[in-house]
Amino acid sequence: MLQNTKETANFITEKTNFNPEIGIILGTGLGGLVSEIEIEHSLPYNEIPNFPLSTVEGHSGRLILGILGGKKVVAMQGRFHFYEGYSMEKVTFPVRVMKFLGIKNLILSNASGGVNPDYEVGDLMILEDHICLIPNPLIGSNLDELGPRFPDMSDPYCKNMIQIAQQIASKNNLPMQKGVYVALTGPTLETPAEYKYMRIIGGDTVGMSTAPEVIVARHMGIPCFAMSVITDLGAPGKIQKVTHEEIQKVSEVAEPKLTLIIKQLISKI
């Protein structure tokens, strides 16, 4: 895995001669942030050695390198999921590559279902913690060059970046939730009983990504910040049938607010 990671990072560096400071992973229907990037290089995943391919609608499958908020960024327009049949090593492989490209911070976004009864469709939520019910991506032999065998996870999301994002939201009169994200394997959306269980164990939203990527980033000492767009509701009395297409549409409507916060956050870190 380490050899493949270095090979991929070296390919990207030699191809672009670009050294990003910040990594960005964009979730379902949230790829429009790319339009705000002054793009210097755009690499389709199928042209990058060892990279998986995104198979989910709403995930374009390009690695974007350019300038956003005055900083050099590398952005994944489309991520990988365990439910696509990829191993956890493959799902989180791009985070390892970003580390070798030189990123100092990682910013993530996702679409998620709200199980907090106070949430509404279209809300934005800053992740202050997560519960990962997807197999842990660090299972297997540990590579000491990347991080410790037993990494601490008492501070998964950077408190400084959370504070800055909250200030940006307040200044722009954007309502903002803050809560706990529960990561499940998918690809099924949850049953009413499962939604209830997620709330009982301390969740505010539920989704199928993000937490494994954060675990790998924190293993390597990379500070993380993540935001969810609440695209559907799993609270009692609010549960409705929902399709992936409807989730995409809600994400796209909420995206300009998320983009504003991420762009300004990047400029301040």
Image (spheres, helix red, strand yellow):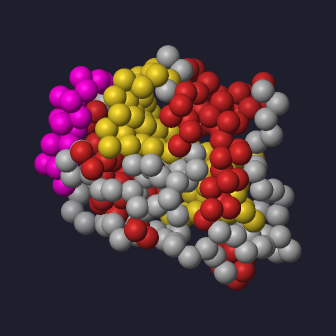
Furthest-top residue in view? 70
Q: Is residue 141 left or right of residue 189?
A: left
Which picture quadrant has residue 64? top left
Which picture quadrant has residue 72? top left
- Does residue 85 appear in the picture of this structure? yes
Q: Is residue 9 magenta?
A: yes
- Does residue 225 appear in the picture of this structure? no
Magenta stretch prevailing secondary structure: helix
Relative vertical location of residue 4 with respect to residue 239 in this rendering, above or below: above
Q: Is residue 164 magenta?
A: no
* Residue situated in front as seen by the camera: 236 or 39: 39
Residue in the picture at 42% in, 25% down: 39
* Residue situated in front as seen by the camera: 232 or 202: 232
Residue in the picture at 55% in, 35% down: 33
Q: Is residue 188 left or right of residue 67?
A: right
Relative vertical location of residue 35 with respect to residue 84 in this rendering, above or below: above
Report x, y in % for residue 206: 63, 64
Relative vertical location of residue 260 with respect to residue 226 in this rendering, above or below: above
* Residue situated in front as seen by the camera: 57 or 64: 57
What stretch of residues is rendered in magenta? 1-21
Q: Is residue 99 left or right of residue 175?
A: left
Report x, y in % for residue 139: 31, 66
Q: Which quarter of the image is occupied by the N terminus?
A: bottom left
Report x, y in % for residue 151: 37, 52
Report x, y in % for residue 32: 56, 39
Relative vertical location of residue 65 with respect to residue 8 in this rendering, above or below: above
* Residue situated in front as seen by the camera: 234 or 167: 234
Residue in the picture at 52% in, 54% down: 58
Residue in the picture at 55% in, 27% down: 36
Q: How many marks?
A: 0
